[in-house]
Structures are given as structure tokens and as C-alpha cells.
Image: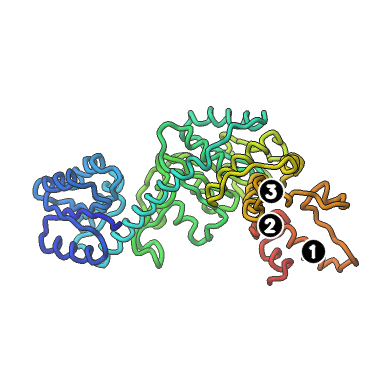
């Protein structure tokens, strides 16, 4: 479905030309030449995107902007202002406009910004659909273990303080994102949930991704762009792997946590966001502070509320109910009839240590649903190998069998073993080994 666009401008020549160009770009364009016509157009159909001129025959578009936001709260608004009228542009952004255009408007610039706004509309729709789907998939199961019950009770109390930062600590795979989503839904008035994997952001783009940039801030910045801090306004910004943020950006994040204010990259205007920041890491941030890789003041600010999520092996009571819930979810995804567990599978679930926590449990169940065809799952992948005491204790134990190989070969095998344990996530494997990423690649034999 194409993006619907309402172009509000009293210049008939420009309006006709712009409407023609935007229609060729795939937009469904309607035009209005006054505030009176705009209100009538909005009454007929709510547009996805509004391009609003400031100077109109019957009023000021900037003054009308709050009314527009009330009439069509989901619409993206681009404000057209006179060339050099930066004050109006800043006021428009603060009043709820997504971006601004300087008049006289270049058609190429108009198309570029309209495309960007349309992408934002489509992204928001995808986020809403994903949130609806995830609402059921990621809903917290009522835990049986006392430690997890205590964690959820703590989250219920934290939810009453909407702006205070939260730091989630726990091993890889314990479900920190699910906990963050649970905290998000505990609030009655919810903005968006925005998930950021800090480890996946390139150092050169991390500031722009988080805080946005203004047009011309760097070579490819042809238009202004909102950062994820702005996108999460009124909701929750989940900073996964927060320990990976560069030191220089940590200072800017600290300022935002203290004041709720920030500046886009290349911008001079101070913007604000009410997003709650929830950070997560499997690193020991105390050690990172001591090593000079993480700011001590940021650590203290993030840990206003510090929540330790216990590993799955410390809450054995939750394994079977969680496995049953995950199997039901996976059966729906794979289009398979609901299945249960055999008596042997239940015993294996109770005995297995799950070093990869909930993520490993999900992977084991998904693999079993694909490879096992019986009415009940056997989970033979969790069965220990007969006669192997080490494997009986831990099916993922690292064993060197046969003639003794050179130390270099043992190191290479162990690196590959850890990489397999981490489901192919190379950066996680390097961190688990306590070595740098280049060293990890050399030990793996790929550099």
C-alpha cells in the first residue's frame, strides 16, 4: 500500500509541480491551499505524511501544528519554513514536526525527505506489527523459582518510576531482552520499545544511530535523521551489550540520563526525550571500570536499579514449564501440531545444566521439532554419551581424544568448541575466551 501524503501550500505552481513529482514517486498525493482546506482534507482521510507550509492565507502553519498533531497523531509532518529561518525550524521540531524544508524548496530535496519520512512510517508500522506479535511470544511465564519470583516483584516496583535507568546483569542467553520487554508492558502508558545491540553498531555510526544527525553532519548526511533515543520517546530504549559503547559516547549517554536532553550529531539545538533507558550486559562492569574501558559515573548512573537475572541452572523449577511454553510457541511458528515430552525427555531436561541458558533451551527444542517426528519429543541431543564420565557431567565438555596433538592445535580446537557453544556468535566467543577479536580470528585460523 502506497504512502498517503497531504501537501499544504498556497503556491499553486509549486503545489502542482510537487504533487506531480511525488505522485511519480509512488505517493498518493492530495493538496490543500489553506488551513480551512486542510481541516476538510483531514476529516475525509488521515494521511501518513503531511508537508505543511508555514505562511498560509488564513493562518500560520506553525501555530496550526499542535492542532494537526491532535487531529492525526500518527502522521509524520515535514514543516516548510523560509530560507534561513532556523528559529522557526527548531520550534517546529519541538512542536512535533519530524523534519523541515527550507523555501524555496528544491524538488530533489523534497523527494528525498518524503522518501525518508515514508520509510519512517513503514518502519513504525513494522514495529507495531512486531510488537503485537511479540506481545504473546515474549510474555513472561509465571516462574516457580523463588529467585525469579523475586526478580519479577522487583520489576513491578521499578515500573512505578518511569524514567529511572535499569541495569540488567546476567549470563548470555538468560533472557535479558524478555525481562526488558516485561518491564515495558508493566507501564500503563506505553511508548515504543526500541532494542539496540550496541555490539553491532559500527564505531563510526554509533552516535548518529543513537542520537540522530542533522543534514550535512557528515559526507552522506543528505537529510536530517532522528536517532533511536528520539524514536523511543515516551517508551523504553533497551541498550543491549552496553559495555561495548565507545568511551566518547558514554559521556553523551550520561548527559542524556542526567537531563533527558541531547543534541543530534552536527546540531546545536538541544532536544529532549522521556525514554527510559534499560541497559544489559554479560560483562563485569566493575572490572571494565577498573580497566578504564567503562566510565565509573555512567556505571553508577545506569545502576540506579540493578537487576541480576539468575542463570537457568539456578532455577531448575522453571525449566520444564519454560520448555513447554517454548515448544508451543515453536510449533505455531513451524506449523506443526502441538507435541509433548516423553518421560525420558523430561528427565533429560531436569538433569541438563544448560550452560547457554534459555537461548540454548530454545535452540535444542527447535532442533528437536525439526529432526524428531514422533508424537512426543525425546530430546536425544541432551542424552549423555554412554561410558563417557565427562560427557555425563556436561554434554558440552571439551575432550581431546587420541594421540596428543600440539598445543597450537588444541587451542584451535578449543576456540572452535567455544564458538559452537556460542551458536556461531564470534564476538561473544572472543569475550568468553578473554581475548581480542583479532586474536580470536588468528586462533581460529582465519587470519
Report the residue marked by disc 2.
Answer: 429
Q: Quarter of the image holding residue 31?
A: bottom left
Give the position of the N terminus as an image quadrant.
bottom left
Seen from the viewer's position, the closer of residues 80 and 12 is 12
| Label 1 environment density (alpha carbons within 10 Å; few <14, some 14–19, many ≥20) | few
Q: Residue furthest front?
A: 375
Q: Position of residue 269 (x, y in %)?
A: 35, 49
Report the residue marked by disc 1.
Answer: 411
Q: Residue furthest bottom?
A: 447
Seen from the viewer's position, the closer of residues 86 and 378 is 378
Q: Position of residue 403 (x, y in %)?
A: 90, 67
Between tags 3 and 2, which lies in front? 3
Residues under labels 3 and 1: Cα distance? 21 Å
Give the position of the C terminus as an image quadrant.
bottom right
Number of marks in picture: 3
Between tags 3 and 1, which lies in front? 3
Seen from the viewer's position, the closer of residues 94 and 6 is 6
Helix, strand or loop at disc 1?
Answer: helix
First in sequence: mark 3 vs mark 2: 3
Query: Residue, x 66% and y 35% (percent of image)?
Result: 318
Query: Residue, x 65% and y 59% (percent of image)?
Result: 424
Instruction: Kindly check if marks 1 and 2 are in contact, taking CB atoms under 8 A apart as contact.
Output: no
Helix, strand or loop at disc 3?
Answer: loop
First in sequence: mark 3 vs mark 1: 3
Query: Relative to 417, is 390 above or below?
Result: above
Query: Relative to 169, is 145 above or below?
Result: above
Report the residue marked by disc 3.
Answer: 356
**Residue 10 in view of the camera:** yes
Q: Quarter of the image holding residue 326?
A: top right
Q: Position of residue 178 (x, y in %)?
A: 55, 41
Q: Position of residue 151 (x, y in %)?
A: 61, 32
Amino acid at each position: 500500500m502506497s504512502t498517503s501524503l497531504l501537501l499544504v501550500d498556497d503556491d499553486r505552481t509549486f503545489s502542482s509541480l510537487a504533487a506531480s513529482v511525488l505522485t511519480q514517486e509512488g505517493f498518493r498525493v492530495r493538496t490543500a491551499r489553506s488551513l480551512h482546506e486542510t481541516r476538510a482534507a483531514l476529516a475525509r482521510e488521515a494521511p501518513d505524511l503531511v508537508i505543511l507550509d508555514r505562511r498560509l492565507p488564513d493562518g500560520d502553519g506553525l501555530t496550526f501544528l499542535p492542532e494537526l498533531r491532535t487531529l492525526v497523531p500518527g502522521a509524520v509532518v515535514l514543516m516548510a519554513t523560509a530560507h534561513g529561518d532556523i528559529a522557526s525550524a527548531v520550534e517546529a521540531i519541538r512542536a512535533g514536526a519530524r523534519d523541515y524544508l527550507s523555501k524555496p524548496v528544491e524538488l530533489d530535496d523534497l523527494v528525498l525527505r518524503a522518501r525518508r519520512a515514508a520509510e519512517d512510517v513503514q518502519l513504525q508500522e513494522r514495529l507495531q506489527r512486531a510488537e503485537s506479535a511479540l506481545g504473546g511470544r515474549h510474555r513472561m511465564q509465571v516462574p516457580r523459582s523463588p529467585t525469579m519470583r523475586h526478580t519479577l516483584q522487583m520489576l513491578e516496583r521499578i515500573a512505578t518510576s518511569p524514567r529511572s535507568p535499569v541495569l540488567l546483569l546476567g549470563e548470555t542467553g538468560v533472557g535479558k531482552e524478555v525481562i526488558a520487554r516485561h518491564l515495558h508492558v508493566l507501564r500503563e502508558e506505553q511508548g515504543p520499545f526500541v532494542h539496540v545491540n550496541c555490539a553491532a553498531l559500527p564505531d563510526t555510526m554509533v552516535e548518529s544511530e543513537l542520537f540522530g544527525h542533522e543534514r550535512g553532519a557528515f559526507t552522506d548526511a543528505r537529510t536530517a535523521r532522528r536517532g533511536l533515543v528520539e524514536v523511543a520517546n515516551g517508551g523504553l530504549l533497551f541498550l543491549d551489550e552496553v559495555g561495548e559503547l565507545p568511551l566518547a559516547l558514554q559521556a553523551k549517554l550520561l548527559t542524556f540520563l542526567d537531563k533527558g536532553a541531547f543534541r543530534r550529531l552536527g546540531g546545536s539545538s538541544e532536544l529532549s526525550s522521556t525514554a527510559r533507558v534499560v541497559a544489559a550486559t554479560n560483562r563485569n562492569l566493575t572490572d571494565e571500570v577498573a580497566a578504564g574501558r567503562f566510565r565509573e559515573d555512567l556505571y553508577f548512573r545506569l545502576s540506579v536499579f540493578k537487576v541480576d537475572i539468575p542463570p537457568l541452572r539456578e532455577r531448575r523449577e522453571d525449566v520444564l514449564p519454560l520448555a513447554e511454553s517454548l515448544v508451543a510457541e515453536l510449533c505455531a511458528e513451524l506449523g506443526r501440531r502441538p507435541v509433548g515430552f516423553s518421560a525420558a525427555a523430561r528427565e533429560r531436561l531436569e538433569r541438563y545444566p544448560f550452560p547457554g541458558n534459555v537461548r540454548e533451551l530454545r535452540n535444542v527444542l527447535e532442533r528437536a521439532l525439526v529432526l524428531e517426528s514422533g508424537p512426543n519429543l525425546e530430546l536425544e541431543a541432551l542424552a549423555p554419551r554412554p561410558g563417557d564420565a565427562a560427557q555425563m557431567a556436561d554434554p558440552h565438555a571439551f575432550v581431546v581424544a587420541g594421540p596428543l596433538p600440539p598445543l597450537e592445535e588444541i587451542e584451535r580446537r578449543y576456540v572452535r568448541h567455544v564458538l559452537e557453544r556460542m551458536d556461531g556468535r564470534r564476538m561473544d566467543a572472543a569475550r568468553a575466551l578473554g581475548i581480542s577479536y583479532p586474536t580470536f580470528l588468528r586462533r581460529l585460523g582465519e587470519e
